[in-house]
Image (spheres, grey):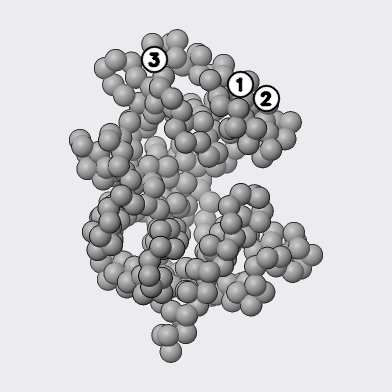
């Protein structure tokens, strides 16, 4: 049932643990299907998890199986913490076995299908405002500070250098990140990956958020993944970035200055992750960091 291309990716990413996980996942799929009398559709486009539509005849689901580790655990715990408010509902699952049975968001039209940027910004702001919440008791999620350690790994990878990422941009991010973290205001449970593709339209529930990573930080930080997406085709990317930053700061009562500074930091961090994982193109983050740097300079 698992496509060969996805199986090959898991082997490339996880080495000898990859085939073990694939075999176990096939067993989990068969067990869940039999115990709950489910029928499966064709798998969705796959990245790091195996995701497939399922139905018991009365309800439509999405079955998601992840590689064992903190990322899956954090998503599982985040869905539990959100309890469905503005977020896709976790119907059933096993943190230990690494699977989740989620409500199927139908028709599942992604936010990037909306063409007018003002409408996109309004929808994104509404969704973010609903899901952001105080940190739950006993929360065990990574923090923005934890994520910032990616710069240390970048330096270690390149013997103190920065590889394909311009040194001056890394230095700016390395300076800004500690300043932002040391002056942070109230912290929240954030989504961690709230881009256009993770906001889907449901005929029943309206716009619904999926795939939370679970992250502790300032609300400004959760805006950045959205701002990093779907900008390349805009005739004036800098104007688009300024519009997004200004509108979100105004509509959600955020700090524009902190937002654009986090933007530079996360753009470089995103580029660094590309070099670390061997997936994606770091040039996207690099170009966006330059745009955020221009916005920062324009403040003065």
> Circle 2 — which element?
helix
What residue is at 29 percent from the left and 15 percent from the top?
57
Q: Are marks 1 and 2 in contact (CB under 8 Å)?
A: yes
What residue is at 58 percent from the left and 57 percent from the top?
281
Q: Is residue 187 visible?
A: no
Viewer-closest of 41 and 96: 41
Residue 20 is labelled as 2
Q: CA distance from mark 1 to mark 2?
A: 6 Å
> Where does the C terminus fall, quadrant-wise?
bottom left
Image side of residue 60 versus residue 47, left or right: left
Q: Residue furthest right?
A: 159
Q: CA distance from mark 3 to mark 2?
A: 24 Å
Image side of residue 96 versus residue 128, left or right: right
Relative image position of residue 66 (x, y in whole percent):
54, 33
What residue is at 47 percent from the left and 40 percent from the top?
75
- Which residue matches tag 1? 24
Counting labels gives: 3
Residue 61 image-quadrant placement: top left
Residue 15 image-quadrant placement: top right
Image side of residue 127 versus residue 98, left or right: left
- Which residue matches tag 3? 38
Relative image position of residue 126 (x, y in whole percent):
25, 55
Relative image position of residue 108 (x, y in whole percent):
31, 38
> Circle 1 — which element?
helix
What residue is at 25 percent from the left and 38 percent from the top?
202
> Circle 3 — which element?
loop
Relative to 107, residue 190 above or below: below
Label 2 crowd (10 A; few <14 / some 14-19 / many >=20): few
Badge 3 or badge 1: first in the primary sequence? 1
Badge 3 or badge 2: first in the primary sequence? 2
């Amino acid at each position: 049932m698992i496509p060969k291309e996805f199986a090959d990716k898991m082997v490339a990413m996880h080495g000898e643990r990859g085939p073990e996980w694939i075999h176990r996942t096939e067993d989990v799929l068969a067990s869940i299907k039999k115990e709950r009398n489910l029928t499966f559709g064709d798998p969705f486009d796959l990245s790091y998890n195996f995701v497939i539509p399922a139905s018991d005849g009365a309800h439509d689901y999405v079955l998601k199986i992840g590689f064992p580790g903190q990322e899956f655990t954090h998503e599982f715990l985040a869905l539990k913490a959100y309890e469905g408010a503005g977020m896709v509902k976790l119907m059933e699952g096993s943190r230990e076995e690494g699977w989740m049975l989620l409500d199927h968001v139908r028709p599942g039209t992604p936010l990037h299908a909306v063409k007018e940027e003002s409408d996109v910004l309004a929808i994104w702001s509404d969704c973010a405002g609903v899901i952001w919440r105080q940190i739950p008791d006993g929360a065990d999620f990574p923090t923005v500070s934890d994520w910032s350690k990616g710069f240390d790994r970048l330096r270690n990878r390149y013997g103190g250098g920065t590889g394909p990422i311009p040194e001056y941009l890394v230095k700016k991010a390395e300076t800004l990140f500690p300043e932002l973290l040391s002056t942070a205001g109230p912290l929240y449970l954030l989504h961690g990956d709230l881009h256009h593709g993770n906001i889907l339209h449901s005929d029943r529930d309206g716009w619904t958020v999926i795939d939370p990573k679970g992250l502790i930080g300032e609300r400004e930080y959760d805006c950045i993944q959205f701002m990093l997406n779907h900008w390349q085709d805009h005739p004036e990317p800098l104007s688009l970035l300024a519009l997004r930053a200004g509108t979100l700061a105004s509509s959600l009562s955020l700090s524009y200055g902190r937002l654009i500074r986090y933007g530079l930091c996360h753009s470089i961090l995103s580029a660094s992750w590309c070099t670390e994982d061997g997936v994606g193109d770091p040039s996207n983050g690099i170009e966006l960091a330059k745009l955020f740097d221009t916005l920062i300079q324009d403040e003065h």
